[in-house]
Amino acid sequence: MRQLTRREITYAIFAIDGGKGGVGKSWLVRLLAFLLTINEIGWVGFDVDPTNQNFIRFHANDDITFIDWTIPGEWDRMFSLISQVDPEKCILIDFASQIGSVLPVQYPRMQATADHLGRQLFRLWTASPEYDSLNILNQTLEQVNCDRTFAVKNMRAATKEDFREWDLSNTRASLLADGGTELVMPELSVGAARALEREDTPFIHASLDTLPAWFYYDVQAYLSEVRTAFAPLIGRISQ
């Protein structure tokens, strides 16, 4: 029998979704990689975006597999590889923006795979202020149970007022009433974000060797905010 460690961890599958390009999905998956790493939770990644492989770009030395979602057999390959992942590692999947047309078929298959492996499947919806983002989420709420759905408001290029329509929407109310969770992704200064991007630096490797002191301060302050903002998610998988 496996000996219990100092905490029990739910080694879940995290599907990072958002329905549109430019809403911050790849940024979010990089933050999740950081949060898992600092909490000493191992992870494996899948980059399902043939046109913009930012997950792989920023984590070139980590275990991330490219999956071309436009090829039906690639989904089978991903599910097969997921089945082979160390059961004591989480799985991060960064979806492409154009992928919505196939998710009504592939989400149930992913859920069946997760159930077979005894893993939970969590959906992280990267929400932007545009009505399209709200509308797409509304149309796809049933793809993953609401109690395992996290709506992440991306504040990188928005204000609280920009999300007023979201905050007052029936979609948000239904999600929260059915057990969904809302998170807020804080804003990082443009200069610090660009400095990380110029060097393809993952958040976990941000240091004074890779950033000027003022941008390093910005990044560390930002990641402190992120840890607080995403505490409900980490609390869900780690006790």
Image (tube, rainbow, N blue to C red):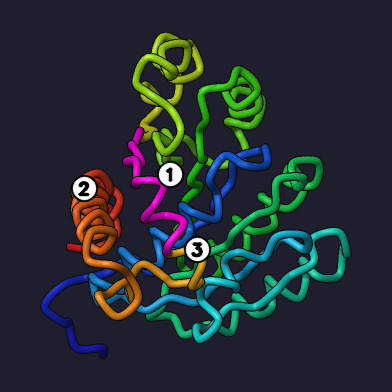
Residue numbers of the magenta segment: 182-195
Question: Judging from the image, what secondary structure is the residue with disc 2 in?
Answer: helix
User: Which is nearer the N-term, disc 2 or disc 3?
Assistant: 3
**Quadrant the N terminus occupies:** bottom left
Query: Circle 2: is it few (<14), some (14-19), or many (20+) Cα within 10 Å?
Result: some
Along the horizontal axis of the image, is 71 left or right of 230?
Answer: right
**Cα–Cα gap, marks 2 and 1:** 23 Å
For label 3, the residue is 197
**What's under tag 3, amino acid-wise?**
Glu
Q: Position of residue 54 (x, y in %)?
A: 60, 64
Question: Judging from the image, what secondary structure is the residue with disc 3 in?
Answer: helix
**Cα–Cα gap, marks 2 and 3:** 20 Å
User: Which is nearer the N-term, disc 2 or disc 1?
Assistant: 1
**What's under tag 2, amino acid-wise?**
Glu
Which quadrant of the view contains residue 46?
bottom right
Q: Position of residue 119 (x, y in %)?
A: 46, 65
Mark toward the viewer: 2 or 1: 2
Q: Does the segment drawn in magenta span residue 194?
A: yes
Which quadrant of the view contains residue 31?
bottom left
CB within 8 Å, label 2 to label 3 = no
Depth check: give the residue in front, 214 or 239: 214
Q: Position of residue 198 (x, y in %)?
A: 51, 67
Residue farthest along the left direction in this orientation: 6
Query: Circle 1: is it few (<14), some (14-19), or many (20+) Cα within 10 Å?
Result: some
For label 1, the residue is 148
